[in-house]
Image (cartoon, rainbow, N blue to C red):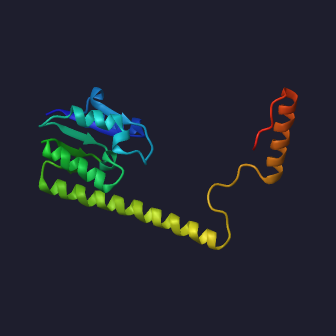
Amino acid sequence: MNSHVGMSQKIDQQVDALAAVGVESARVYSDKLSGTSTRQQRPGLAALLDYAREGDAIVVVGIDRLGRNAAEVMTTIRDLGERGIVLRSLREGIDTSNATGRMVAGVLASLAELELELGRERRSASREARRARGQSVGRPKALDTSKMALAQRSTRAVNRRARLPPRLV
């Protein structure tokens, strides 16, 4: 049985954890993308899924490495199961070679998605509360009005010296 790996971010820690359980470094697949990256935007995961064959085991540090939300993770786990590929997650101690492992993977993925959704709801409620109080929402402006005016004057002065047309700032 071959072992393969799907990972993202914090790569050194993850590679060390995988090496500790016997995964060969040549069989480590990785993506360094944002948390909002979709499965289609992850060439490392795509290469891993293309490489894995029936009877193989894919080892991941955590099931969250397989997708951005529970639906994506569960779709990947289901697809792997249908192809006869086992998933082993080190962090959660999951092994999908048995029914209990598949059930636990589903519950953990659902809890992870719930936490993401609750976080979104909290951030949205916080934004609305700040708006209701007349407070600013989002990142503070880098320049106050006096610094912005100075930057605009400086730009116009440079443009005049260089004989460039004025720009809208």
On screen, residue 157 versus residue 114, left or right, reads right
In depth, the one of 69 and 86 nearer the eye is 69
* Residue drawn where x is 63% and y is 69% of the image: 131
Looking at the image, is 91 positioned above or below residue 162?
below
The location of residue 32, given as percent across then percent down, is: 42, 37
- Quarter of the figure with the C terminus: top right
In depth, the one of 110 and 98 nearer the eye is 110
* Residue drawn where x is 23% and y is 34% of the image: 50
- Quarter of the figure with the N terminus: top left
Answer whether residue 25 is visible to the viewer in this image.
yes
The location of residue 168, given as percent across then percent down, is: 76, 43
* Residue drawn where x is 57% and y is 66% of the image: 127
Answer whether residue 20 is visible to the viewer in this image.
no
In depth, the one of 149 and 85 nearer the eye is 149
Q: Please identify the quarter of the rendering in which residue 23 is found.
A: top left
On screen, residue 76 versus residue 161, left or right, reads left
On screen, residue 144 versus residue 86, left or right, reads right
* Residue drawn where x is 37% and y is 45% of the image: 38
In depth, the one of 118 and 23 nearer the eye is 118
The location of residue 36, given as percent across then percent down, is: 43, 48
The tally of labels here is: 0
Looking at the image, is 119 positioned above or below residue 156?
below
Q: Please identify the quarter of the rendering in which residue 166 is found.
A: top right
The location of residue 126, given as percent across then percent down, is: 56, 68
